[in-house]
Amino acid sequence: MHPATHHNTRLGMLLLVSGPSGSGKTTLCRRAAKAGIANYAISCTTRPPRPGETNGTDYFFLTIEEFKQKIANNELLEHAEVHGNHYGTLKSEIFTHIQAGRDVVMDIDVQGAEHIRNNTDPQIQRALVQLFVMPESEAELRTRLTGRGTDSQQIIETRMQNSLEEMQHWQKYTYCLLSTDRETDYQKFQAILTTESLNTNRINPV
């Protein structure tokens, strides 16, 4: 049985997963959640849904007014403005789970990760684990960003520049996963979850 199912014997972990676009970080988080070994923390945003995205599954889609109200009510663990849109993490998506001993995974940009890293809440500090996922080379990064070839060269170059800037932050994280293929990446991802579930720092005294 996965340790996340043992309620109240330990504090759940909060695994932050960052990495450039196309690194596979979201896929890793969602696969772990689907397998039942962690809970996926859904972020909230003011950007409009993209085709195929569902409210409450991909994001909590909020108006700017609703988002600002949550800031005023101190409901957000962190929030940031990215490319003119607001993104944030609801405290309710984190604390409910980790206090019950359930592990939480979330894909988050380096800016949001920095805010959570600097959070002084003792439960957040005990729960926190950080993973940076990155391609093995710049050539591989470009291949992934090019994808199906539907984006313009300008968009690809902008993403490439943003990704290279994000990758400068990898040393701030606990772990760095050099991405190869999906199955190998997921095996390593599971290994981190398993290892960190045994961390004595999160085991509650009997």
Image: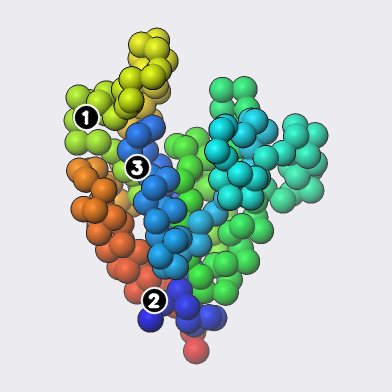
Q: Residue at x 21, y 53 (%)?
A: 184
The answer to which of 12 and 157 lies nearer the viewer is 157
Crowd tier of the residue under label 1, counting other residues whose Cα lies within 10 Å: few below 14, some 14–19, many 20 or above: some
| Any part of residue 204 in sight | no
- Kind of residue at disc 3: Gly
- Kind of residue at disc 1: Glu
Comes first in the chain, label 1 or label 2: 2
Which residue is disc 2 drawn over? 2
Disc 2 element: loop
Q: Position of residue 37 (x, y in %)?
A: 42, 67
Task: Kindly indicate whether the residue at mark 2 contacts the one at mark 3 (C-beta within 8 angstroms).
Answer: no
The answer to which of 132 and 107 lies nearer the viewer is 107
- Kind of residue at disc 2: His
User: Residues under labels 1 and 2: Cα distance?
Assistant: 34 Å
Crowd tier of the residue under label 2, counting other residues whose Cα lies within 10 Å: few below 14, some 14–19, many 20 or above: few
Q: Position of residue 142 (x, y in %)?
A: 27, 23
Q: Position of residue 21 (x, y in %)?
A: 38, 32
Q: Residue at x 53, y 48 (%)?
A: 116
Q: Residue at x 35, y 42 (%)?
A: 24
Q: Residue at x 39, y 47 (%)?
A: 27
Disc number for residue 24: 3
